Image (cartoon, rainbow, N blue to C red):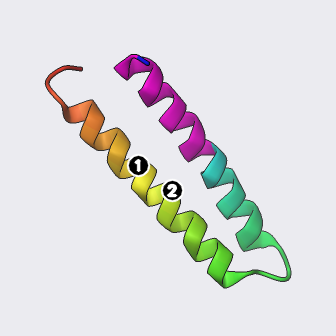
């Protein structure tokens, strides 16, 4: 997988998680543990995107 396609996939995952976090936060029976885990995964993906985007090979 090329770096560009990998970054594209990571961005898609980040956007999907973002939508899930928003939906979970709006739901009446918010599962705070699940919400926290989704936010952690979202942050990890964001950090990986930033790291790969800053790499000199890109």
Residue at point 62%, 52% (across, down): 17
Q: Pointers 1 and 2 in contact (CB under 8 A)?
A: yes
- What residue sits right under mark 2 in the picture? 42
Segment colored magenta:
2-15
Secondary structure found at label 2: helix
Residue 14 magenta: yes
Task: Please tell me whether residue 17 is drawn above or below residue 12 in the rendered image.
Answer: below
Residue at point 18%, 20% (across, down): 57
Where residue 35 sits in the image (x, y, percent)?
Answer: 64, 73
- What residue sits right under mark 1 in the picture? 46
Is 7 or 21 nearer to us in this picture?
7
Task: Please tell me whether residue 13 is drawn above or below residue 32 in the rendered image.
Answer: above
Residue at point 46%, 20% (across, down): 5
Task: Please tell me whether residue 2 is drawn above or below residue 9 in the rendered image.
Answer: above
In screen coordinates, is 44 left or right of 17?
left
Quarter of the figure that contains the N terminus: top left
Residue 10 magenta: yes
Where residue 32 sits in the image (x, y, percent)?
Answer: 66, 83
């Amino acid at each position: 997988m090329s770096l560009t396609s990998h970054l594209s996939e990571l961005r898609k995952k980040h956007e999907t998680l973002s939508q899930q976090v928003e939906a979970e936060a709006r739901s009446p029976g918010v599962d705070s543990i699940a919400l926290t885990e989704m936010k952690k995964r979202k942050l990890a993906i964001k950090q990986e995107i930033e790291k790969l985007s800053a790499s000199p090979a890109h």
